[in-house]
Image (cartoon, rainbow, N blue to C red):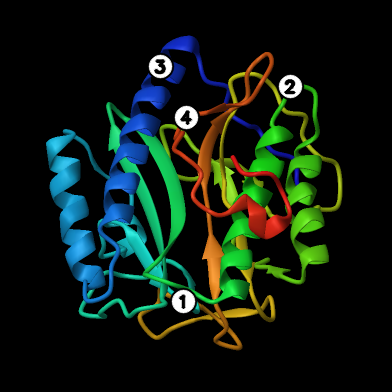
Amino acid sequence: MRRTRIPIKSPREIDFMRTAGRIASDILQALAREVSPGKTTGEIDKLAAELMRQHDCKSAFLGYRGFPGQICISINEEVVHGIGGPRRIQPGDIVKIDVGIIKSGFIGDNATTVPAGEIPHETKRLLAVTEQSLYQAIDCARPGRKLADLCGSVEEFVEPRGFTIVREFVGHGVGRRLHEEPQIPNFRPGGKSPTLMPGMTLAIEPMVNAGVPSVRILEDGWTVITEDRKPSSHFEHTVLVTDGEPEILTLRPRTALPEMLGLPPL
């Protein structure tokens, strides 16, 4: 792992991050409730713009390196970075929604995967494994732990359950900028690993495929799809490293079914 200088947030900056995270979560949950067969991805993107206006914030994605959407919205084999448009959600689709907002100069970033109606059993497992892998990683976001342990925890949970990790796209530090140090892959990186310290804010985001791990980018220059066109799942939280328990700044109720993993109900 390369040497990195990870920003440490002051108490005042953390307060701003908490506000940005709460708003990002509220917007994400509102958009997730709108996912249903017949809706277009463009309609959900347009609603995102209206919700951001109501919350007096703006998209962290719109215009970032030329990205044309308010949010990233990706369906089925689309892994991340899908652009809202005329595509209509179909029964049985899984829809990934990634919301990043800027409020008072700080960014909240989070994502979820939402089923549109009934989905196959194995796709339910995919969502449950991906969401649980996020929480496995969050549990490692503690002072004194190595970042590599956090990263490795995702792959170590996912792969024994028959799914694969996207390696080309990773999580990241987040704060005043959308992408700060460190990079946070969903697999154990080699080399010397940074030690986590209180005040670090991390966007942890497992991207998990039902089939092969390889991906490619479509001609729009943004949308990432699985090479074999099998479904992919994506969950993300912005997390603060504290003196003790990790604090999820984008807290929301869990949605995937823990019983799919043989775990007790939440």
Residue 16, image x, y percentages: 37, 21
Q: CA distance from mark 1 to mark 3?
A: 36 Å
Decide if residue 157 is on the left or right side of residue 231.
Answer: right
Residue 26, image x, y percentages: 31, 38
Residue count near mark 4 (Cα–Cα under 10 Å), binned few <14, some 14–19, many ≥20: many
Judge whether residue 1 can be spotted in this image: no
The residue tagged with tag 2: helix, strand or loop?
A: loop
Instruction: Check disc 2 and report the residue beneath it.
Output: 143
Which labelled disc corresponds to residue 76? 1
Q: Amino acid at mark 4?
A: Leu
User: Which of the two discs, 4 and 2, sits closer to the camera?
Assistant: 4
As drawn, which residue projects farthest toward the bottom?
228
Answer yes or no: do the residues labelled 1 and 3 have beta carbons within 8 Å?
Answer: no
- Position above or below: 75 against 144: below
Which labelled disc corresponds to residue 29? none
Q: CA distance from mark 4 to mark 1?
A: 27 Å
As drawn, which residue projects farthest toward the top?
11
User: Residue drawn at (65%, 42%), measured in percent from left and top?
Assistant: 135
The residue tagged with tag 4: helix, strand or loop?
A: loop
Placement of the C terminus among the 4 image quadrants: top right
Q: CA distance from mark 2 to mark 1?
A: 36 Å
Judge whether residue 236 can be spotted in this image: yes
Residue 52, image x, y percentages: 19, 42
Residue count near mark 1 (Cα–Cα under 10 Å), binned few <14, some 14–19, many ≥20: many
Q: Amino acid at mark 2?
A: Pro
Instruction: Check disc 4 and report the residue beneath it.
Output: 249
- Position above or below: 124 against 220: above
Q: Amino acid at mark 3?
A: Asp
Instruction: Check disc 3 and report the residue beneath it.
Output: 15
Specify the quadrant of the image occupied by residue 51: top left
Specify the quadrant of the image occupied by residue 140: top right
